[in-house]
Image: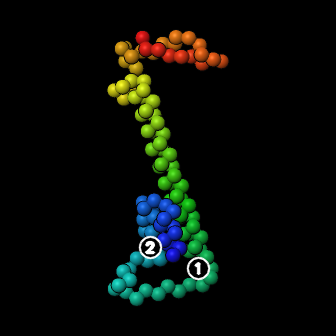
Amino acid sequence: ENIESLRMSVSSEAFLVFQRTAQGMVGSLPVKTFDIRVGTDVSGMEQLLYSSMVTGYVVRNAEFRMKMNEKVREGAAQVFTSVNPDGKGSASNSSLLRPIHAVGAGSLRWSRV
C-alpha cells in the first residue's frame, strides 16, 4: 500500500531509480529462488529508513531539476524561433531588429528592418 502511494506520486523513472537503490542496500536476490530473511536491530532499521528517505529526496530533486532544465530549454528555443524563424537564435541581415519608439519607462518596441 505504501509503495503504491509512492509509485503514484513520482515519475516511473524516479521510482525505478529509487527501487534499484533500495534493492542495492538490502540485496537483490530473486525472491522466487531464495528464501531471504533480513535481521537487524532498531538502530540498523533507523539507518536504513533514513538512507531511503535521503535517497528519495535526492532522486526527486534530480528529477525536478531535469524538468526545470527542459522547460528552460523549451522556452529559449521559442524565444530564438520568434527572433529568427530558422531557430538558430541569431538575427540574420534580413531579419535585423531596430527600435522604433519608446513604449514606457525605459522599454522599447522593436521592428524588423
Q: Residues within 10 Å of mark 2 (few under 14, many from 20)?
A: few
The residue at the point 39 percent across, 24 percent down is 84
Image colouring: rainbow
Q: Can you say which quadrant of the picture contains the C terminus?
A: top left
Residue 22 screen position, x and y as percent:
47, 71
Q: Amino acid at mark 1?
A: Gly
Question: Label 1's element?
Answer: helix
Q: Residues within 10 Å of mark 1 (few under 14, many from 20)?
A: few
The answer to whether 3 is drawn above or below residue 74 in the figure is below
Residue 44 screen position, x and y as percent:
59, 79
The residue at the point 47 percent across, 66 percent down is 7
Q: Nearer the viewer, mark 2 or mark 1?
A: 2
The residue at the point 43 percent across, 14 percent down is 112
Judging by the rendered image, the residue that carries numbered circle 2 is 23
Question: Label 2's element?
Answer: helix
Q: Is residue 35 left or right of residue 57?
A: left
The mark total stands at 2
Judging by the rendered image, the residue that carries numbered circle 1 is 44
Q: Amino acid at mark 2?
A: Gln
